[in-house]
Amino acid sequence: MISVNEYGMDILEDMMDNLEELQVAIVELENGTTVIDAGVEEEGGFEAGLYVSRICMADLADIQFSSFDLGKFSCPALELTTDHPIIACMASQFAGWSIKVDKFMGMGSGPARALSLNPKELYEEIGYEDDTSEAILVLESSVIPDEEVTTKIAKDCNVEPEDLYIVVAPTASIAGSVQIAARVIETGIHKFESIGFDINSITHGHGIIPISPVVGSDLECMGSTNDCIIYCGRVYYTIDYENVEELKEYVKKVPSVTSKDYGQPFYKTFKKAKFDFYKVDAGMFAPAEITVNEINSGKTFTSGKINPEVLLESFGIETL
């Protein structure tokens, strides 16, 4: 079995060897936990975001920078390809761990989740477990976690605090924008799972997605980064699923356009819901366009559409 923490550690060590080039820094906590600041106090950047993305996916994906044509202009983008989509995206990358300790709040993703089993039902569904003495977690947060927070995380992962490694990147940062864009394959798989599809039949994945500029606060950037997925994220999956007619019905339901809240920048939708996630249709968190190749029948299906106009509005582009 592939160990997501062992694979992630190789990338983390490379990141720590290139701190100055990546414009990140190490923060050593008194309990021995190592934290890498990729955008809180440090500048971070595109390359730092690439490393964070690779750690999130346990280096089980090829991730490269590209560009995306939005009509009025081109913006930076990511292209991703993985032959291990379930392990890379669901066992590791999925932001399934809400960490709350005293006043600290952050979303945890990456390899350490496989040790804490957050959420446990997902790991049972995909039949994955990891067993290592070191844990690597990525936190989407604007605050460096302290000893109390990291001790709790280490305990949940069943490792010592000195064997815990955390990378922190705020939503409102370049590195944050990159690592959120890298979730485009994962969001499609998660949408499949949420509508009852057997995600273990997904064997390969590819995606291309714009990278959001930093548009303001963490909350505003949460909107624009999600909009990159919702309105212009394009994904392609190879699937081993013999019931082709049933598969076609699932494919129709995956794209974000099927959501009742589709049609305007996410920040506006969220604000209208008084910033309560429970009042926003969870079905909107999905790629704009999905294409599926079923390998037994040789059939390929596509559903959804990209919507650059909404993304341009979300970015707040001014033409001079």
Image: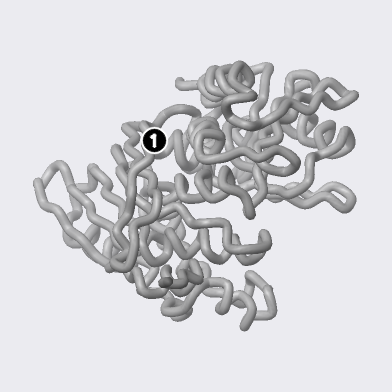
- Name the secondary structure under disc 1: strand
Q: Of the residues shown, which amino acid type is indicated by label 1?
A: Ile
Q: What residue is rendered at 13% in x and 43% in y?
A: 296
40 left or right of 78 in image = right
Q: Is residue 254 visible?
A: no
Nearer to the camera, 132 or 181: 181
The image quadrant of residue 272 is: bottom right
Nearer to the camera, 51 or 107: 51
Q: Residue furthest bottom?
A: 272
Examine the rendered structure and indicate whether residue 293 appears above or below residue 117. below
Q: What residue is rendered at 71% in x and 35% in y?
A: 37
Estimate the x, y position of residue 85 in percent, counting from the top left. Answer: 38, 38
160 left or right of 278 in image = right
Q: Residues within 10 Å of mark 1 (few under 14, many from 20)?
A: many
Q: What residue is rendered at 37% in x and 52% in y?
A: 209
Q: Quadrant of the C terminus?
A: bottom left
Examine the rendered structure and indicate whether residue 112 appears above or below residue 281. above
Estimate the x, y position of residue 257 in percent, counting from the top left. Answer: 36, 73
Estimate the x, y position of residue 6 in percent, counting from the top left. Answer: 55, 18
Q: What residue is rendered at 29% in x and 38% in y?
A: 204
Estimate the x, y position of residue 163 in percent, counting from the top left. Answer: 74, 19
Examine the rendered structure and indicate whether residue 95 appears above or below residue 22. below
Residue on which disc 1 sits? 63
Q: Residue furthest front?
A: 320
